[in-house]
Amino acid sequence: MAKIEIPDAILVNKYIDGDENSLAILVKRHQSKIYGYIYSKVSDRDLTEDIFQDTFFKVIHTLKSKKYYNEEGKFLSWVLRISNNLIIDKFRNDKKMYMKRDTEEFSIFASITDNSPNIEKELINNQVDIDLKKLIQKLPQDQKEVLMMRYYSDMSFKEIADITGVSVNTTLGRMRYAIANLRKLIEKNKIYLTS
Amino acid sequence: MAKIYTKRKLATKKMLPKKETIRLILQYSCALNIVKMGNMSFDTIAN
């Protein structure tokens, strides 16, 4: 006896009406195609698993909210479109992570750099730090304290204003003068602060 | 008896998601409830 398969459209409608078992049937019926489709695009099992899950979360949400879905007997293509959009989103987020393969002409190690400072850079940085602190000491007291609190204590202008007992605008003004005066001092003393 | 020299079909196995993933999806579906109130809709997930 031939096995009669309930059409997707009917299962979708039954699911919308609250029959959870219909979703189980739909998932079981199409899981292989959807999973295979995602895997063909991302080639990573874990990622496929994640996107598969998110796809059905979207499907469930859309169907339960009875908002967007218009069943025309195209459940599978609709689900595949959702998964495709999720894959695009994923690649869009990861587009900065480009892939390079190791070949004879190109060694992968040629493009890997160590960004941690070497001894020379560290020495220069320390010297710049010392020079800068000396210059800050030469600033007027009110400007100096705003600058120190902002850059060395990482405080907000509101907090600085509260502590120093002046308005935020005054604090901002002092900061501006502090920076301008520092620039003048640097020019006057011919100090190079680049590392 | 003659040997069969035809190549075995190199069909890949069906790709299927993990059972846990399916279970999670179905549980999410059971737990999710969306209530509409005017223009707004509220999602509640039963624990």
Image (cartoon, coloured by chain):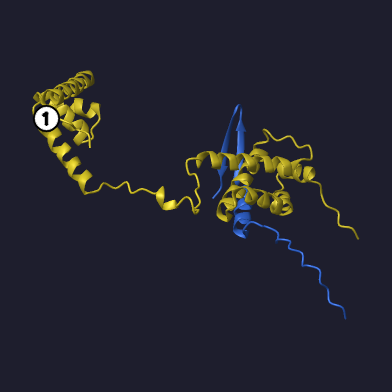
Q: Name the residue beneath numbered marker 1.
A: A135
Q: Return the x and y of residue A16 as percentages of the image width and height.
A: 71, 41
In this image, A44 relative to A191: left or right? right
For chain A, give the colour. Answer: yellow
Tag 1 subunit: A
For chain B, give the colour. Answer: blue
Three-letter code, disc 1? Leu
Identify whether B1 is placed above or below A149.
below
In this image, A152 relative to A63: left or right? left
Q: Return the x and y of residue A132 as percentages of the image width and height.
A: 15, 33
Q: Return the x and y of residue A19 as percentages of the image width and height.
A: 72, 48
In this image, A130 relative to A63: left or right? left
At label 1, counting other C-alpha atoms closer than 10 Å, the crowd grade (few under 14, some 14-19, many 20 or more) is some
Q: Quadrant of the C terminus of chain A?
A: top left
How many marks on residues? 1
At x 64%, y 56%, the residue is B17
- Tell me the SS state at disc 1: helix
Residue placed most toward the observer, A66 or A43: A43
Residue placed most toward the observer, A66 or B25: B25
The picture quadrant where one finds residue B36 is top right
The picture quadrant where one finds residue A66 is top right
Residue A17 visible in the shown view: no
